Image (cartoon, rainbow, N blue to C red):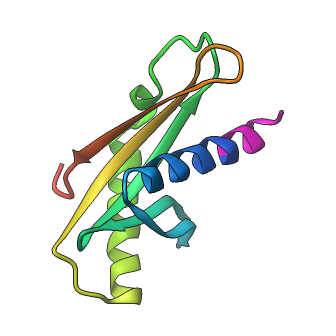
Amino acid sequence: MTTFLRGRAFETAAARFLESKGWTVLARNVRVGPVEIDLVVVRDGVLAFVEVKGRGRGAPAHPLAWLTRRKRARVVRAARGWLQRTGGTWRGVRFDAVSVREGAPGRLIIEHVEDAWRADD
């Protein structure tokens, strides 16, 4: 499987995981300028922009270790653009992260980090 296809599979797994926790996926792979937001989800009036990071079995670092300050800042800028473009009233807006790792054959280990960073970080 190519890196691109593995990434899409991890994003699909993350979306399904969030849906199982009561989140509704509003958008996937949203492009705002040169930046892509992996998932835009909502639950109970709270909007979350979600960055999905995945790694294969035996990867040397946790997937979220790859969520750099630069990437977080780019997602914040893209989220601001998305909000300006789409409007809407939300009880809250935040930035979440989901890590997807390959575990035992055929198994994924998924972690959802709520409020993983702030717009002013």
Q: How far from the left and from the top, in percent, is residue 3?
A: 74, 36
| Residue depicted at x 38% and y 78% | 81
- Reply above or below: 78 against 11: below
Q: How far from the left and from the top, in percent, is residue 83?
A: 34, 80
- Reply above or below: 49 against 67: below
Range of magenta residues: 1-7
Say whether residue 5 is magenta: yes
| Residue depicted at x 29% and y 88% | 88
Magenta segment's dominant SS is helix
- Reply above or below: 27 against 97: below
Q: Is residue 73 left or right of residue 6?
A: left
Residue nearer the viewer, 71 or 13: 13
Residue 103: image quadrant is top right
- Reply above or below: 41 against 71: below
Q: How far from the left and from the top, in percent, is residue 60?
A: 53, 11
| Residue depicted at x 47% and y 27% | 63
Residue 93: image quadrant is bottom left
Say whether residue 65 is magenta: no
| Residue depicted at x 41% and y 31% | 64
Residue nearer the viewer, 68 or 45: 45
In this figure, what is the number of numbered marks?
A: 0
Q: Is residue 62 left or right of residue 34?
A: left
Residue ranking furthest to the right: 1
Q: How far from the left and from the top, in percent, is residue 8?
A: 68, 48
| Quarter of the picture holding the N terminus | top right
